[in-house]
Amino acid sequence: MADGLCCQLTFPAPRLAPTRPDLSHDTQQNWEIPRNQLHLKRKLGDGNFGEVWYGKWRGIVEVAIKTMKPGTMSPEAFLQEAQIMKQCDHPNLVKLYAVCTREEPFYIITEYMVNGSLLHYLRNDGSSLGIQALVDMAAQIANGMMYLEERKLVHRDLAARNVLVGDKISGVPVVKVADFGLARKLMEEDIYEARTGAKFPIKWTAPEAATCGNFTVKSDVWSYGILLYEIMTKGQVPYPGMHNREVVEQVELGYRMPMPRGCPEQIYDEVMLKCWDKSPERRPTFDTLYHFFDDYFVSTQPNYAPPST
């Protein structure tokens, strides 16, 4: 073209009210809605396989509508994203509302996030974001990924471009992981093996996934470390000045991106570098990552008081 709290809270991930006010029980079970209930108002983005539109459902509910360009991919592949999203219900994952599959072009209808992608938000509004907001967004993303981790779902495309930004709560933007087009359910071995020739965003992809096609929750953890680089640099491209093949070669030789300017040393040393451990087994879990960021200011600033609402 993007649970549960415990321990002492200092800057908690926002809690949102339900965002499906017009969904009947029948629609939530069956997901299919009549196409004529949708009004596509403006295009939000497009890619090789389809477009994303802002629209209204029944003239009231704001939605994002993902369409498939006929002939670009199989309907089954397009709708696999919706199949994954049906399994997910978490405040830091973009919610599926409905689908239109009775005729082409097929639609996947999700909640609308008013501030667009995190990448765009960082590049355009990053100057107004202090370390508190950056840490809170990192916690929210880890919280959503922890939910996927618990359900043995691997995202495979975690990056700032695939995280969406909503309204602010207590001065902090709500962020949600989106774009589940590459997401897959892990099998017994906890490994998803990608088909030969599949293409992936190399600069965000763990070395074992880039070279062997082996995706696990721990390859998502590697991508989360790259996403942290995007957050701490306010949207810079990872591995600046390096092309994909060079990135693969240098990472295999042990190269890791240096600490971004302004990034707290503890975040770089204790999180980013650990996310980029060559051994997947030594990388942290998303549960660990979430609690690191959720407790960050208590552990680093004993006298820290969270912002008043």
Image (tube, rainbow, N blue to C red):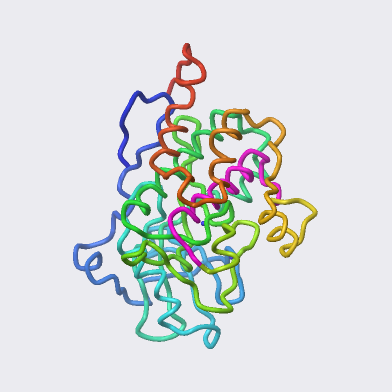
Q: Main secondary structure of the magenta part?
A: helix
The residue lying furthest to the left in this view is 25
Q: Which residues are magenta?
A: 214-237
Query: Which corner quadrant of the image does residue 245 belong to?
Result: bottom right
- Disc count in the image? 0
User: In the image, residue 214 lies at what x, y percent?
Assistant: 49, 66
Could you tell me which residue is drawn at 38 percent across and 58 percent down?
Answer: 61
User: In the image, residue 264 lies at what x, y percent?
Assistant: 62, 28
**Quarter of the picture holding the N terminus:** bottom right
**Quarter of the picture holding the C terminus:** top left
User: In the image, residue 265 lies at what x, y percent?
Assistant: 62, 28
Whether 49 is among the magenta residues is no
Whether 216 is among the magenta residues is yes
**Which of the two residues, 244 or 136, is positioned nearer the viewer here?**
244
User: In the image, residue 57 lies at what x, y percent?
Assistant: 38, 65
The residue lying furthest to the top in this view is 303
Q: Above or below — where is 103 with respect to 300?
A: below
Q: Left of 255 or right of it: where is 231? A: left
Query: Which corner quadrant of the image does residue 101 belong to?
Result: bottom left
Could you tell me which residue is drawn at 32 percent across and 34 percent down?
Answer: 5
